[in-house]
Amino acid sequence: MRHFIFAALLVAALTVLGILGLEQARLLPEQASLQAVGIDWLFSLHFKVIAFLFALIVGFMLYSIFVFRRREGDTTDGDHIEGNTSLEVLWTVVPLGVVLYFSFLGAQVLGDVERIDPLALEVDVIGSQWAWRFEYPDYDVVSTTLVLPVDQQAVLRLSSTDVIHSFWVPEFRVKQDVLPGDENMIRDLRVTPTEVGEYTVRCAELCGTQHAYMTAPVVVVQEDEFQTWLEEQAAAIPEDPVERGRLWAEQNACLTCHSIDGSKLVGPTWLNVYGSQEIMEDGSTVIVDDAYIYESIREPALRIVEGYPPAMVPGLGENLSDEQIADIIAFIKSLKE
Ligand SMILES: [Cu+2]
């Protein structure tokens, strides 16, 4: 009994140390959404259980190693123990109860996290190799920065033009895979930002060579600033076709694969490409003109430039109107030195 009390004290001390250690370690970043509150609460509860289990196992083990070690000259065998039914029942039933209780708590928090606000701000989030685009269908605004008003639920409708990506802003805690395909593959993610500030959305699903750079800024602002931003965006479409083309190229992730400074990325650079002669995979040659660029966007699989993978996915151009493609052509034309 004396041993038991000492070991129990050791376990209690280790538990407290473990909990303090885990809390001090600040494993989670800033908490910046309503959904994060329940998730963090569940997390800290898990920390406590984890600290206790660790202490229970390691505490008893350390106590036994030091207190019951073999004395010098002692060559006798240890006691032969057949088993202990009440102990076995206890260590089966108690963990089972704990796990069931945690699944109940988990379901409750999940219910909170997915709670629907009918007035939620709708944003279509489109992931492409390797950039994000954010469309605000109620306001006709398209942006490469996700701007959200504080203390208002946003419903993010996630879709992909190519492979599976994953939308993740660590400060919001919630994360959701972004799937290619038709409307049935669109996934909703609800976030209610609670802290004005700047964050980063990162892709959390390995999606190709530039996966690590697939980030976009997230800005949470006051409601009135959000309205001002929307108005500015609507007015921000440039008059000049070249500048418009640059904007469409940025918004549609073209510039993650096509450089405008001559460097070779995943695709051919756009610098000096207009009017140049290129060799295709099948050995034929092509003069890069309006029709060829148009075709490269609408039917990317038709002709592949030699030395490059047939990487451009058909979905990328589907979002572009003929007018927008004309602007992109004007932009490519302007890239001469
Ligand atoms: Cu990705």
Image (cartoon, rainbow, N blue to C red):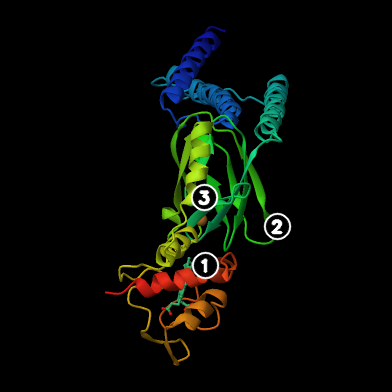
- Location of residue 67 with respect to 226 vertically, above or below: above
Mark drawn on residue 324 = 1
Name the amino acid, label 1. Answer: Gln
Name the amino acid, label 2. Answer: Glu
Q: Residue at x 51, y 71 (%)?
A: 325
Residue named by callout 2:
183
**Of marks 3 and 2, which one's residue comes earlier in the chain?**
2
Could you tell me which secondary element the residue under label 3 belongs to? helix
Could you tell me which secondary element the residue under label 2 belongs to? helix
* Mark in front: 1 vs 2: 1
Residue named by callout 3:
234
Place residue 91 in its image quadrant: top right
**Of marks 3 and 1, which one's residue comes earlier in the chain?**
3
Local packing at callout 3 (Cα closer than 10 Å; few below 14, some 14-19, many 20+) is few
Q: Point out residue 139 in the picture as x, y percentages from the top left corner.
A: 59, 47
Image-based side of 107 in relation to 12, left or right: right
Q: Point out residue 52 in the picture as x, y percentages from the top left corner.
A: 54, 21
Q: Point out residue 231 in the picture as x, y percentages from the top left corner.
A: 51, 44
Q: Nearer the viewer, residue 319 or 108?
A: 319
Q: Residue at x 57, y 26 (%)?
A: 37
* Mark in front: 3 vs 1: 3
**Of marks 1 and 2, which one's residue comes earlier in the chain?**
2
Q: Nearer the viewer, residue 314 or 79?
A: 314
- Measured Cα–Cα span from mark 3 to mark 2: 26 Å
Could you tell me which secondary element the residue under label 1 belongs to? helix
Name the amino acid, label 3. Answer: Ala
- Location of residue 12 with respect to 329 vertically, above or below: above
Local packing at callout 2 (Cα closer than 10 Å; few below 14, some 14-19, many 20+) is few
Image-based side of 201 in relation to 269, left or right: right
